[in-house]
Every structure is written in structure tokens, then in C-alpha cells.
Image (tube, rainbow, N blue to C red):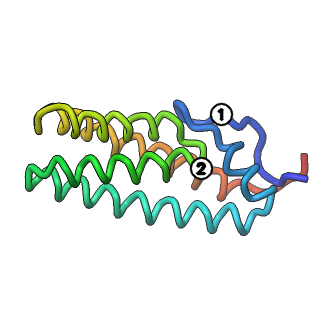
Amino acid sequence: MKDFPSSPIGVGGFDVSVLEDLVDGDRAMFEKFTQMFVSSFETALANVDSALANGDLVAMRAMGHRAKTTARNIGAIALGNACEMLEITSETSTIDAATQAAVGLRPMFEAVRTELSRRIDQPTHSI
């Protein structure tokens, strides 16, 4: 029995049912995994910002790879794909191309975080 609002597809490319299935409907675990995702992704974004400031394509590639997995594990598929683009671009292109790939990560992350917060804040009900 899940006690989350229905409609698994939230913001573009985010399938919250992946996280719901992972925690098997446990609201406390949902909140814990959400907090872990937010904390991990904020760290990754800070590292991307630092790598951008230093022109460090190797660090950007590593952060894209790490963040890709973090996003996909909770169902943020589009965000994971954007991280993969950063990973690939940082390996095969210039700093300008990598910067373009990195620009959209923060707004996509904020949209996913907002959707997760919305689901946590909604009253529970049984489906």
C-alpha cells in the first residue's frame, strides 16, 4: 500500500514512481532518500561550479558521471540524461561546450526538488 499522491510522472522526465518503488511506499524512507538525493546533488552542482570556474574538464566529466547516477536512481531521468551530456561533452569538447551542458543542470535539479517537496508536503492517503 502506497501513501503517496497518485500520478507518478511529475516535472519533465521525472518519474517519482521509481523512488516510490525503491522505498516500497515507506513515507519516512521516501523523505530520507529525498534528503540524500538533494544533499548529494547540491554537492555535485557545487563541484561542477568549481570545475567550471577552474576550466577543469576532468572534474566536470567526473561530476557529470556521479550526478547522472544519483539522478537516475530516484527517477529523474531527464536530469540524469543532462548529466550524461555534461560527462560526454566534458570528455570530447571544449570548456565552452561543457559550460553549455552544465547551464541547465541547476534549474532541472530545482524542478525535481520542488516536485519531491510537494509530494512530501501533501497529506497522505491510501491508494
What residue is pinned by disc 1?
9
Residue at 58%, 60% in the rendered image: 34
Instruction: Please say if 80 is above or below 24.
Output: above
What residue is pinned by disc 2?
74
Residue at 81%, 56% in the rendered image: 25
Snapshot quadrant of residue 10: top right
Task: Tell how many labels.
Answer: 2
- Distance Cα–Cα, label 2 vs label 1: 12 Å
Dot 2 surroundings within 10 Å: few (below 14), some, or many (20 or more)? many
For the residue pair 84 and 38, the one nearer the viewer reads as 84
In the picture, measured across the screen, residue 23 lies left or right of residue 69, that is right
Residue at 40%, 53% in the rendered image: 66
Amino acid type shown at disc 2: Ile
In the picture, measured across the screen, residue 46 lies left or right of residue 73, that is left
Residue 106, image x, y percentages: 33, 46
> SS at mark 2?
loop
Residue 99, image x, y percentages: 18, 39
Residue at 60%, 43% in the rendered image: 75
Residue 35, image x, y percentages: 54, 66
**Mark 2 or mark 1: which is in front?**
2
Instruction: Please say if 43 is above or below 106.
Output: below
In the picture, measured across the screen, residue 1 lies left or right of residue 91, that is right
Amino acid type shown at disc 1: Ile
